[in-house]
Amino acid sequence: MKSHQTTQTMKPATAAKKLGVYLPATPAEFQEGVVSRAELDQLQADPPEWLRELRRDGPHPRPVVAAKLGVSIAGLARGGVTEALTTEQIEALKQERPEWLEKERATQAEVRKEAARLKKRDAERAEEGHGPQS
């Protein structure tokens, strides 16, 4: 029996997510095709101009917008941000510092602080020979 090596492909939406770009802003040929693992690796290793521009200027997908603003995706929604934003729009929000953004940044900081506390606690328990517990 002969084994066939099949090329692993993904939908454009999956590839865009892995590349950290907003799918509707990508070229039509990217949106309409399929992307192989090798093509994705090539795009990541040597991004074409359109990919470099999207990463630099946007529009950016919500996970990227949230990260750039230092808030959660849910925090974006609570702040009324439901669409992709450009780098310029993100910078404007950082300058304006609306109340919702300050509140969400504080919430995110507390979440990170609590996660770090739990990680430290679990590490200490593991050193003592106990498994991680809630």
Image: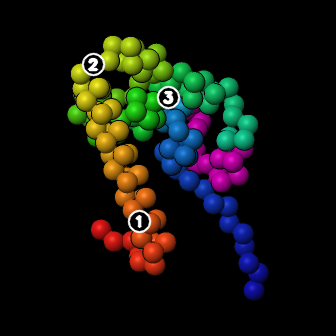
Q: Which mark is residue 4?
A: none
Gap in Å between the C-alphas at discs 2 and 1?
Answer: 36 Å
To which quarter of the image does residue 76 belong? top left
Q: Position of residue 5 (x, y in %)?
A: 72, 69
Q: Is residue 56 visible?
A: yes
- Ranked by sequence position, the earlier of labels 3 and 1 is 3
Q: Secondary structure at mark 1?
A: helix
Q: Which mark is residue 98?
A: 2
Rendered position, 37 above or below 31: below
Residue position marked by numbered label 3 in the rendering:
25
Camera-nearest residue between 113 and 58: 113
Residue at figure coordinates x 28%, y 38% from the top left: 107
Residue 110 as seen in the image, left or right of residue 28: left
Gap in Å between the C-alphas at discs 3 and 2?
Answer: 27 Å
Farthest residue, direction bottom: 1
Gap in Å between the C-alphas at discs 3 and 1?
Answer: 43 Å
Q: Residues within 10 Å of mark 1 (few under 14, many from 20)?
A: some
Amino acid type at mark 3: Ala
Number of the front mark, 3 or 2: 2
Residue at figure coordinates x 38%, y 13% from the top left: 95
Q: Position of residue 112 (x, y in %)?
A: 38, 45
Amino acid type at mark 2: Pro
Residue at figure coordinates x 40%, y 29% from the top left: 69
- Ranked by sequence position, the earlier of labels 3 and 2 is 3
Q: Secondary structure at mark 2?
A: loop
Q: Which residues are magenta?
A: 27-42
Residue position marked by numbered label 1 in the rendering:
122
Camera-nearest residue between 84 and 103: 103
Q: Is residue 117 magenta?
A: no
